[in-house]
Image: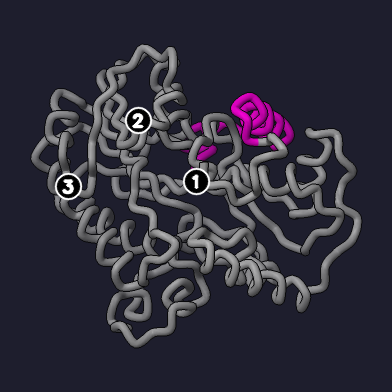
Amino acid sequence: MKALVLGATGHIGAHVVRALLADGHQVRAAYRHDCYLHVLEGLPVERVRVDLESLEGLPEALRSCLWVFHAAGAYPGPRERHDEAVARAVHTTRRVLDAFRQAAPERVVFTSSASTIRRVPGRLATEQDAEPWSPHLSSAHGTDMPPSAKRQVGGRPLYATVKIAMEREVLRVAGEGIPVVIVNPSVCIGEYDAHRFSGRAVLFLAKARLPFYIEYMLNAVYTGDVGVGHVRAAERGRLGERYLLAGHNVALKDFASMVAHAIGAPPPRWRVPYGLALAVSAASELIARVAGTEPMLPRSAVQASRQGLGLDATKAKTELGLPQTPLEEAIARSIAWFKAHGYLESGRGLLDPR
C-alpha cells in the first residue's frame, strides 16, 4: 500500500509516517518547508514538496496513493481576522477535497481536533458532542467585530472555529463519494514536535518551573498512539465517522507535576484563584497580540477551567484499537526530544519562534 501523508513534518504527521512504515506501507511524505525536514531524517520515505494554498505539487503527490492522510490543515495566523481565517480555511479545504475526488483514493483520513468537541458538564464528552456549525461561527459578523472577538468567537478560540468549519466541509463531501474518516486528537505529547504547537505546554512548564497552578482538566495523549490511530482509521474506520483519539483525563496540577518530575524540579504547590488566573490570561493575550504570537494562557482556557474538558475515547479504543501509552512516558519522550534539539536551553525564550 502506498500512502500520502500531507503535513508529514508536523508533530502528528511525523508519527503517522512512522506508524505507516511500522506496518510495512510505502510512504510519500509531503512537506512545505525545508526547515522541518529533520523530523523525517533517516526514514525510507519519498519526500515531495506540496503547497496546499496554491495546490502546487498536490496532483502529482496524490498519484498512485491508495490512502491519503490530511494532517496539514489550515492554522490561523496570530494577526489574522476571524472572517479571513475561516474563509481561507474553507476555501483551501474545498480545493484540496476536489483534488482528492479527482485522484479517487480508497481512503482519506482527515486530521481535525478535539477542540471541535464541546464541553459537557457532569460527564465525559464523546464524538456525539461535536460543536454544530452555526451563523455566529461564520464570516457573517462582517468587519465591525473588535479584534478580541475575532480571535475568540462564541467563547472559543479562533483555532477551534477554523477546525469546526473545516470539519463541516469534510462531512459535506463524505456524503458525496469521498471515502473519508475524521480523527480528532486531543492534546498531543511526544517527540518530533518541531512546530511546538501542543508541546508548547510541556516546554512552558519545563522552562518556567512555576510553583503554582490553576484548576483545569485536560485530556492528553501520546502522539505515537495518535499516529497508530490514524493508520487504523484508514484500515477499519467507518466512513463519515469521527473518532476521538484521546488519552488520559488529567488535572493540570498533576500534568505539571509529571513535567516537574521529568526534569527533576519541584512540583507546583499553590492554586491560583480563578479571578487572578483570568487577569493573567488577559495580560497573556495582550502580550501575544503585541508580539504577534499565540497567548500562552488564553482566556478561553481559563474560562473553560470551571468545566474542564474530559474526553471519552471508548469508540476509538473499541473500533480502532487505539493504544493508551502512559502519560508519564509521553512527557518523558517529549522532554528528551526537546532537550536533544536545544529547545530547553536557557538562552531560548519561552516565546522563541524558532
Of badges 1 and 3, the one in the foreground is 3
Residue 256's label in the rendered image is none
Q: Which residue is located at x 23 percent, y 41 percent?
A: 51
State the image coordinates of residue 319 (x, y, percent, origin top left): 46, 37
Q: Which residue is located at x 41 percent, y 14 percent?
A: 43
State the image coordinates of residue 280 (x, y, percent, origin top left): 71, 71
Q: Is residue 241 left or right of residue 90?
A: right
Mark toward the start of the polypeptide (2 vs 1): 2
| Residue topped by disc 1 | 185
Q: Amino acid at mark 3?
A: Ser
Q: Quadrant of residue 139?
A: bottom left
- Closer to the camera, 345 or 239? 345
| Residue topped by disc 3 | 54
State the image coordinates of residue 300 (x, y, percent, origin top left): 59, 70
* 303 drawn magenta: no
Mark toward the start of the polypeptide (1 vs 3): 3
Q: Which residue is located at x 22 percent, y 54 percent?
A: 92
State the image coordinates of residue 213 (x, y, percent, origin top left): 80, 59
Q: Considering only vertical position in the picture, is 87 above or below 149? A: above
Cα distance in 3D space between marks 2 and 1: 25 Å
Mark 1 lies on a secondary structure that is: strand
Q: Which residue is located at x 53 percent, y 68 percent?
A: 290
Mark 3 lies on a secondary structure that is: loop
Neighbourhood count class around disc 2 (C-alpha, 10 Å): few under 14, some 14–19, many 20 upward: few
Q: Considering only vertical position in the picture, is 251 above or below 10? A: below
| Residue topped by disc 2 | 34
Specify the segment rendered in magenta.
Answer: 315-343
Q: Is residue 276 left or right of residue 203?
A: right
Cα distance in 3D space between marks 1 and 3: 27 Å
